[in-house]
Image (cartoon, rainbow, N blue to C red):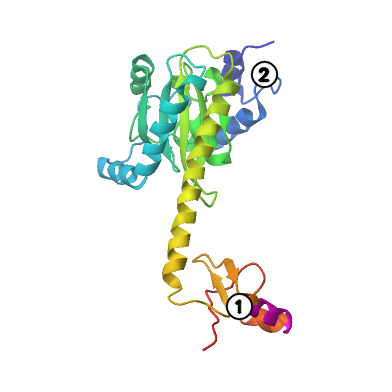
Amino acid sequence: MFTKKQVWETYITAQHVDATVVPQRIAESWDYCSKKNVNPYLSYELDEVPQPTLTLVRKELQQVIRLVKDEIFRLSDFFYVKKPLFVLTDAKGVIIWRDGHHETRDQATSIKFHEGSIWTEDAVGTNAIGVAIRTEQPVVVTQYEHFSKASHPFTCTTSPILDANDHPIATLTVSTMEHVNESQYTLIALQVITKNIQNEFKKEAITTKKRELLEAIGSPVTRGVICDKDNNIVAVSKEFEEESLSKDQNMLVSKGFNKITLIFRYFYQSG
């Protein structure tokens, strides 16, 4: 059986991959990178965002950065990784923060795996960050599974970070140059962190929604419907519900009502 290094070399020269050695997700990524004409020997010509742009993105995601730091500190004992480097990107693959073992960090810097650089598949080939962004799924990419030769010393595990509405806003990665026996433990630990961060966003969204509703209701609603800013019905008065059920449903829909959402924000209140 071929080693993964031999499989990578064969693919780069002949565009053929042994599906028994390389996971399907990695093979699909290699094909994607080939179609995008990514140079597998690219090492020092990576795209980077200007410093003002990086500063702006960091400001926009400062809460994510804070939560990531807190979660890593709290759950550090669950990472069975030697000399780890934690890397946080925005949803476009721009590295906005990193911290970890100095040896791994120095080696990462040598291939421009640092703040401000862009780590999508289009930019650097198959890598955990890029695959996670494109598929919106957690992923592990080991050494020779990377499309770019410069990344072969690393094993990287990445999990997307979602906001309260399940939209990707960032990725969190742990990278190491050491041999990894149990990469699934690392993946699970990362998923716990990213899920905890999303739960914090959901709690904040609920708190904000409650405050907005209280501010919107200037006086008690005796007969009507209350919806949030996303046009979701959150409360229906008893009188209005009884009245609605007795009326033609088509008439209610034409006014923007149904049992789940409102087509537009609508408040019905008797004078």
Residue 240 shown left or right of residue 114 in the figure: right
Judging depth in this view, the residue of 224 and 197 nearest the camera is 224
Q: What residue is shown with label 2?
A: 21
Magenta-drawn stretch contains 181: no
Residue positioned 67% across, 70% down in the render: 259
Q: Residue type at mark 2: give it.
A: Val
- In the rendered image, residue 135, in percent from the top left (x then y), is placed at 58, 40
Q: Quadrant of the N terminus?
A: top right
Residue positioned 37% across, 38% down in the render: 65
User: Element under label 1?
Assistant: loop
Would you say residue 251 is visible in this rendering? yes
Q: What residue is shown with label 1?
A: 256
Determine whether 102 is above or below 73 in the image.
above
Q: Which residues are magenta?
A: 239-248
- In the rendered image, residue 237, in percent from the top left (x then y), is placed at 60, 75
Q: Of the residues under marks 1 and 2, which one precedes in the sequence?
A: 2
Residue 251, picture quadrant = bottom right
- In the rendered image, residue 3, in percent from the top left (x then y), is placed at 62, 12
Residue 46, picture quadrant = top left
